Image (cartoon, rainbow, N blue to C red):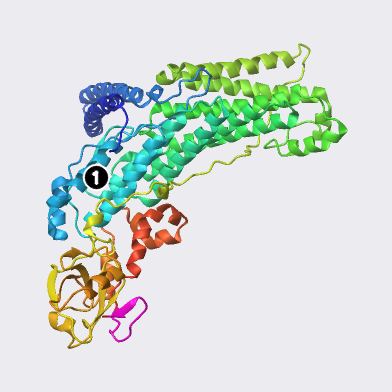
Amino acid sequence: SQQGCDPFAQTQRSKLQHRRARINQQINKEMRMRAGAENLFRATSNHKVKETVALELSYVNSNLQLLKEELEELNSSMDVYQNESESISVPMIPLGLKETKELDLLVPLKDFISEHYGEEGVLYEKEIKEFMELRQAMRTPSRNEAGLELLMEYYNQLYFLDSRFFPPTKTLGVFFHWYDSLTGVPSHQRALAFEKGSVLFNLGALHTQIGARQDRASLPGLNQAIDAFQKAAGAFNYLKENFSNAPSLDMSSASLTMLVRLMVAQVQECVFEKMTLLRAQNDFLSRLQLAQEAARVEDVYSLVHQTMSQPHVKDYVPFSWTTMVQVKSEHFKALSHYFAAIALCDCPTPSDAELLEQEKAFLQFHVTMPEGPSLRVLLQDPEERRKLGKAHLKKAIMKHEEAMRIHGLCKILRKMDILQEVLSFAHKRSLSKYSEIDHEEDFFETGEAPDIHPKTHQKPEIKSPNFSQVKVTDLFHRLGPLSVFSAKNKWYPARRVHLMRGENGFGFTLRGDSPVLIAGVIPGGCAAEAGLKEGDYIISVNGKDCKWSKHAEVVQLLKSTGKEGVDIGVITLQGSECPKAADRKAAVMSSGSGMLKSNKENSRKSLMNSKSASTLLVWSKKSKRSKKSTYSGVPFTAVGDNEAMY
């Protein structure tokens, strides 16, 4: 059976969840009061009333502020996920998993099996319970590869559940309940797409937790963190592209865009750390490279900050996240100027052989050209180098101070000692370098250093989930091949037909397998008299279930019958008597009005044309089989390939 993670973590998480939900109720109440008070304030012309309302408004607003801060603290309990190593790494932002309520599918699925499939629902209790156990385990995945596989397995299993039990025209009548990962606000929907999307979200969130836990002071730890954040970005991006109309904010297009960008920025930061780890040599060119890497990190974090400041995201994202992102943006800008100064001041002037290469690198280094002499003169003159270096340090110190100021504005970040240490270490390092190169007799005004051109040697990749890496078997395999026995197909009640063999055999042609199709019936033959029709599927022979039987097996069973004849069980698909194009089209139409639609995700045609075709191979394999077993209007005389007369 499937294992979730330890129950203790579960209770800790659900406690958080309950507190989140409670605070949110209070926030909503205060918001309603505020809206009422604001309307009154606008409507009244009575001075006294206006004063009273203004007082009430300020009271409500300060309440809201406190509640939001309390919610912040809950959402920023990052220590649950950070690594245990001694070395200093700037904290990363992990996401909490979406919680869900238990779901009892026993009765709805048993009812559907008896109504739609005409089988005893009781006979499938084992499979239904197995599915529910898998769902239960998936609620608390362990923070490792096994946890990721568990989520993938459940996600893949949902494809089968969808095909078997969710007809395009109606729902099962069960609600899927999920809580918003940041606010704890509950949402529910009948659409299975909401369940799929939420599991996909948790796959991304689990990757962020795995990424945040890595020890980034070592190369293997850094590579694992890069991989985890790239896969997180891939999961959120896949969710954004394939699901729409989500009822909860964390899965809205604006939030997912923000999360993808945040993950990409965290990858870029790891790439910078990787460079500092690998950079053994302190030569001019590698320091320029470090400065450009830092500028690139600043660039991506300032994009995340812009995204977090958008109208639909601003009030939703925790203040500590927005602050952290802004702090990092300033911090890395400071570092880019610091490394530029170090390159200029700590490296010897180039030899003639080095000059050309250094000049070429320096030409693309600044966003705008520095004032003063030409680059060639500058590189060869230690005094000019010191001047420009000093300007870069001045800018670095300003940016360090800005990062520390913003950091100080957020109560939650102030509690994070690690971040505090990193910022003040970098600040002191720039200060001491500045005082080292600052000469008392400097009369020149330190100029404005141009910014550094961002450039990276390793572009972050957005890695889409590879669903085919976790193979699953259809739990409801016994219902028969999906090409026929699916929720979208309807068939008439099974018929039992007794068939005698005539001189010319049974008088029908068969085609395909799993299930075998009667492709043609000879007029006046035994099969026609017994009431078999073209387009019937053989589901049993003499009481033996043949839904999954291959062509040859069915033929063998038929041939081994004696004079007493044979009992054949058949079904006819509704609409197969003469399949019209319009009917077929109607069956493919996607459902879900106003619900979270995963129509993009379910239409296989667009899937096969898209890049992600390989990722969903697990899903499309089943549909290939149907090519053999399509009903055709071919008259029995034109015996096609894989068709034979009996």
Is 75 displayed left or right of 168 in the figure?
right
Q: Where is residue 470 in the image (x, y as percent from the top left)?
A: 39, 46
Determine which residue is flagged by label 1. 131
**Who's the residue at 65% across and 31% down the image?**
290
Residue 309 visible in this rendered orientation of the protein: no
Which of these two is toward me, 433 or 14? 14
Element marked by disc 1? helix
The relative height of residue 257 versus residue 373 in the rendered view (above or below) is below
Residue 424 visible in this rendered orientation of the protein: yes
16 in the magenta segment: no
Q: What span is in magenta?
A: 633-645
Instruction: Give the main secondary structure, helix, strand or loop, of the magenta stretch.
Output: loop
Which residue sits furthest right? Answer: 352
Q: Where is residue 430 in the image (x, y as percent from the top left)?
A: 64, 18
Q: Where is residue 3 in the image (x, y as percent from the top left)?
A: 30, 34
The amino acid type, in three-letter code, at marker 1 is Phe
Residue 143 picture quarter: top left
Residue 530 picture quarter: bottom left
Which of these two is toward me, 585 or 324? 585
